Image (cartoon, rainbow, N blue to C red):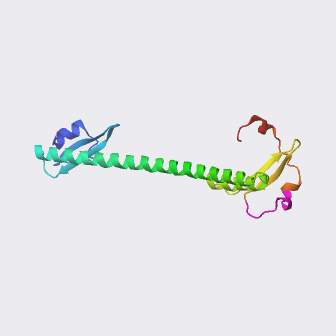
Amino acid sequence: HGPTARLLEEYPAILNPPAVGLTVLATPLRTAAGFAGHLCIRRHADRPFDQRAIALLEAFADQAVIAIENARLFNELQERNREVTQALDTQSAIAEVLGIISRSPTAPEEAMAEIARRAIAVCHADHANIQLYDGEALRLVATSEHGVDISAVPEANHKNDVSVEWLRDGQPI
C-alpha cells in the first residue's frame, strides 16, 4: 500500500482513470486455483492505511474468496445433482420398459411403443418411432403417440426406401 503516486507507478491499472490525492490499498483474492482478482479500497487523502486496515482488508479478501469458493462448489453440486437426476430418470425409464416387456412377452408392439415414449421423455424429444428391417426395407412398427393404430399410419403400409447401410455399421447417425 502507499501513496497514490507510488501505487500508480507500480500498478497503473488499479485506478482507472487515475486520480491525484487518493490512497489506495489492494489485496489479491487467492483461491486454491490461483489468483481470482483483488479487493481494493481507497480514500480521498494521500495518507497510508495502517496495519489494522491492512489486516481487515485481508480478512475481507479471505471472506470474498470463501464466497467465490462456495459459489463454485454450489454450482458443481447443482450440476452433479442434475446428472444424478438424469441418470435416475434414465434408469427408471429402462426399469419401466423392462417391466412392460416382462408383462407382455408375446406382444412386442406394446413394449416397443413404450420404449419410444420413454425415449422421447428421457432424451427430451418430440416424437419417436421404431422401424424394423424385414430383409428388404424398414417398416414402422411402433410410435411414441398414444392410441395410434400403426396399421392406419401411412408409413407403416409402405417400404421405407432409406438406405439401411448405416444400420450395419451399428452407430447412431
Q: Nearer the viewer, residue 10 or 54?
A: 54
For the N terminus, which image quadrant?
top left
Query: Quick check: can you spot residue 18?
Result: no
* Residue located 79% across and 52% down the image: 106
**Residue 127, quarter of the rendered image:** bottom right
* Residue located 87% across and 41% down the image: 135
Q: Is residue 135 above or below residue 145?
A: above
Tell which residue pokes out farthest to the bottom in this image: 147
Percent position of residue 108, x then y: 78, 52
- 55 left or right of 114 in image: left
Q: Nearer the viewer, residue 109 or 52?
A: 109
Percent position of residue 168, x then y: 78, 36
Q: Nearer the viewer, residue 163 or 112?
A: 112
- Please provide the residue range marked out in magenta: 145-154
The question of residue 76 being in magenta is answered with no
* Residue located 86% across and 59% down the image: 151
For the C terminus, which image quadrant?
top right
Percent position of residue 148, x then y: 78, 63
Q: Is residue 135 above or below residue 118?
A: above
- 71 left or right of 22 in image: right
Q: Nearer the viewer, residue 147 or 29?
A: 147
Query: Quick check: can you spot residue 74?
Result: yes
Percent position of residue 132, x then y: 81, 47
**Number of numbered discs on residues:** 0
The question of residue 147 being in magenta is answered with yes
* Residue located 15% across and 44% down the image: 55
Q: Main secondary structure of the magenta part?
A: loop
